[in-house]
Image: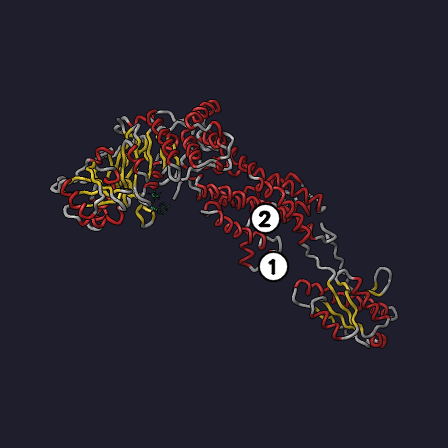
Amino acid sequence: MSSVIQLNRLTRDFGSLRAVDQVSFEVERGAIFGLLGPNGSGKSTIIRMLCGVLQPTGGSAHVLGFDVAHDAEQIKRQIGYMSQSFSLYSDLSVRENIEFYGRIYGLSPEKLEQRFQEIIELTSLGDRLDQLAGSLSGGWKQRLALGCALIHEPQVLFLDEPTAGIDPVARRDLWDLLFDLAGQGVTLFVTTHYMDEAERCSDVGYIYDSRLIVCGKPDELKHLPSVTPEGTSRFEIETVDPATKLATFRELEGVRDATLFGQTIHVLADQRLSETDLIEQIQKEDKSVQIRPITPSLEDVFVTLSRAEGLNHHDIDRSKQTPVEVCPKPKSPEPTESKDVSEDQLVRKKPAPARAGLMAGFWAILVKEFSHVRREPATLLFVFAVPVLQTIIFGFAIDTQIENIPTVIYDLDGRSSARELRDAFANTRTFEIIKRVFDEDAFHYALQSGRAKVGVIIPPDYSDRLLRGEQVSVQVLIDGSDSQVATTALNASNLLGLNLSTQMAKQFAETLPRVPARDAQGAAALPLEVRPRLLYNPDLESSHFFVPGLVGIILQLVTLFLTSFAIVRERELGTLEQLFVTPVSKSGLMLGKLVPYALIGFVETLIVLTVMVFFFGVPIHGSLWELLVLSLLFLVCGLGLGMLVSTVSRTQLQAVQFAFLIMLPSVLLSGFMFPRSQMPLPIYLFTFIIPVTYFLEILRGIVLRGADITDLLPHIIGLTLCCIAIIGISLKRFQKQLS
Ligand SMILES: Nc1ncnc2c1ncn2[C@@H]1O[C@H](COP(=O)(O)OP(=O)(O)OP(=O)(O)O)[C@@H](O)[C@H]1O
C-alpha cells in the first residue's frame, strides 16, 4: 500500500489563533479516511491546506507526492473537493452545473459527454437534468455536488462534512456511493461529526482543539490501552432517564468513568469489580437497569482520549506531546521532489487530466456567466432598461438654466413708464410675473409664503422723477434661500436696469452735440461693445452638456456593480472557494467574469448613445468610432474597479458600500455636476485619479466639440493610466487562495 496524503507537523495560524497544531499522519491509496472532531477543531482548515487553497504556516503536507505549499496547481488538477455547503450554482440546471465543472477541468467535448453519462449513472440524476440546482432537495444537491467533484476522475476526493443537514436515507445512499468509489481506487478524505460514519471509514483521525489526538483503523483504536486501561472493563447500562442518573453512577465505588450515550450510559469500571458486583451496586440505585459488557465504540475512544487531552491541556508542553499513534506517520526527513522517488511520488507521473495555462477555465467561466445573466431577468432589466430610463429621466430633470422665476410686482405709480418697466421684467425669460399686488401686506406675504422668489416695488414718483431727469430707485427683493436662483435673479435684474438706463441715456444723448461714441449708423452709443457668441451649444441646452456626461456616469455605475456583485456573490455562496480548488487560472477566472460584462456594457453604450442622439437630439460632432473605442477603454476601467471592489468586500452588502464610495466622487467631483476649476486645489488634484473625469472630457469633447484624438490626448493618457493602475492593483489583490 502506498500513501497518497502525508502530513508532517502541519500547522496553520490565523493571527494569534492556532487552528491546526503540528498535525502528522498519512492516508493510504484507496482508503476512506475520516477526520473527526468537534466544531472549530481545525478539520476544514486541514482540508483547505491539503487542497492547496490555504497556505500552511508551519510543517508540510504532500498530496499525490506534490507539496501543498508549492505545487498547489498540480494538486488541484488531480483532486476533487466537495465543500461543506455543496457549493453549486443554484440558478444553473443540473446539466449546466456538471458541464461547467467539466469545462473548468478542460475536458474535451467527447470526454465530457462520456464522463457526463457516467456521472449521471453513478448519481442517478438522469431524471433531473433540467431542474435548477437551487430547487433540488438536500440529498440530491449533495449527489450533484459529488458528481461535479468527480467529473474529472480525481484520484483523491476531499469531502468536508458531506452529509451535514441531510436525512438518514440520503446519508446512507451517499455512503454507498463513497464505497463504490473507494472500490474503484479513489482515496476519500471525509470530515464528519457522525460516529456511525466514522465506523464506516477504513481509517479515522480525531482532532481536538487543533491537535490530532488519535489516528488509526477503528478496530485498532478500540483496543488501545489508553482507552480501556489494563485492569478495567466497559459496560453499557440501559436505564430509564439515564441523564438524571449519570452523576450517581459516576460516584459508584470502582467506577472510573461514566458517559451518556443516547439512551444508555457507558461505564468504565475496575476489573476487580465483577459484573455481578456492579449489578448489585447499581440495582441498589435503580431496579429497572440492564447491564452488559461491551467493547468500546469509536465514540468511547474519542471521548476518553479528548477528556485526557483536556485534563492535560494546561500541564503539558504541547510541542512535546504526540498523538496516540496507530496510523502511519510520515517518514522523516520528509519527501523532497528530487530525491527518493517513492512509490507514492510516482503518482505524479500520471498525466494531469486538464491543460494548465494562463487562460485555463476562461471558456467555462464565460459560458457560465452568460447563463447566469440569461437566467436572471432582473439583471437584464438592470443592464438594459434602467440605463435608458435613467438617461431619459435625468436628462430631463437636470436643467441648469434657471428661467421663469416667480415674480410679484407692487406698482405704486401705475403710469405708462412704470408699465414699460413691468413689461421689461415680463419679457425676460428669467422672470415670470405671477401677480401684481396693490398693497404692502400682499407683497410681503407673496415673498414669505415662497410663492414668489422675486418682488419688484415701483415707487409712486417713478414716472415723475424720470421726467424731471432725476435718478429713480426701483427696489428688487430676492429670496436668497436658493443661491442659484437668487444669483440668476440678481444678475438678470442688474442687467435689466442697465439696459433700460442705456436706452434712456441713448435717447437723451441724441440731442447733445457730443456723445461718448457713435455706432456704424451714426447713432449715439457706448464706447465699448462686447459681442459674445455661443459655440457648440448656442441655445444653451442643459441636456447637451449633461446627457453625454450621464452616459459616462451610467456606464460606470452598471459595470462597477455588475462585476463586483458577480464575484462577491460567488464568495458568499462558497462557489468561489470551490473554484479555487479547480485548475482554473487567475486570469481565466477574472477574464471569464469580465468579458461578458464588457460586452453587455458595450451594447449598453450603444443604446444610451442612441437615446442621446435621437431622444435628446444631441448630435455627435466628432468621430463615432473614436468615441466607441474610447468608451471601451472606459468600460475596462469600470470593470477593473468592480474587480477591485470585489477583492476588498466579503459580502454583497460591503460591495454595495464600497461601490457607492467610488460612485460619489465620480458624480460630484468629476466635473459632471460642478466645474472642476472651481474646486479647492487639493480636491481639484484628487479629481485626476477619478477615471470618469477623463471620460467626461473625452465624451463632451467628441460629442459636443467634434474634438479628435490629438485634441484629447492628455485625457486619453490619463484614462489609460487609471485603467492600467486599477487592473494591475485588482489582479495583484485577487488571490486564487483563501486567506
Ligand atoms: N479564514 C479564517 N480566519 C480566521 N480564523 C479562521 C479562519 N478559518 C478558520 N478559522 C478558525 O480556525 C478554527 C478552526 O476552524 P475550522 O473551520 O477548520 O474548524 P472545523 O473543525 O472544520 O469546524 P466545523 O466542524 O464547525 O466546520 C476556528 O476557530 C475558526 O474560527
At a point 54% along the width and 57% down the height, the residue shown is 683
Q: Is residue 737 above or below residue 529?
A: above
Q: What residue type is labelled 1?
A: Gln
**Residue 678 got which mark?**
1
Q: In this view, does 454 lie above or below 663?
A: below
Label 1 – label 2 distance at C-alpha: 17 Å
**Residue 694 got which mark?**
2
Q: What residue type is labelled 2?
A: Tyr
Question: Which label's residue is closer to the chain start, 1 or 2?
Answer: 1
At a point 86% along the width and 75% down the height, the residue shown is 467
Q: Is residue 213 left or right of residue 68?
A: left
> In front: 572, or 472?
572
Q: What element carries label 1?
A: helix
> In front: 619, or 242?
242
Q: What element carries label 2?
A: helix
Could you say where residue 506 lies in the image, as x and y percent from the top left?
84, 67
Residue 308 seen in the figure: no
Which quadrant of the view contains residue 513?
A: bottom right
> In front: 331, or 704?
331
Could you say where residue 604 lies in the image, as x and y percent from the top left?
62, 41
Q: Residues within 10 Å of mark 2 (few under 14, many from 20)?
A: many
Which quadrant of the view contains residue 678?
A: bottom right
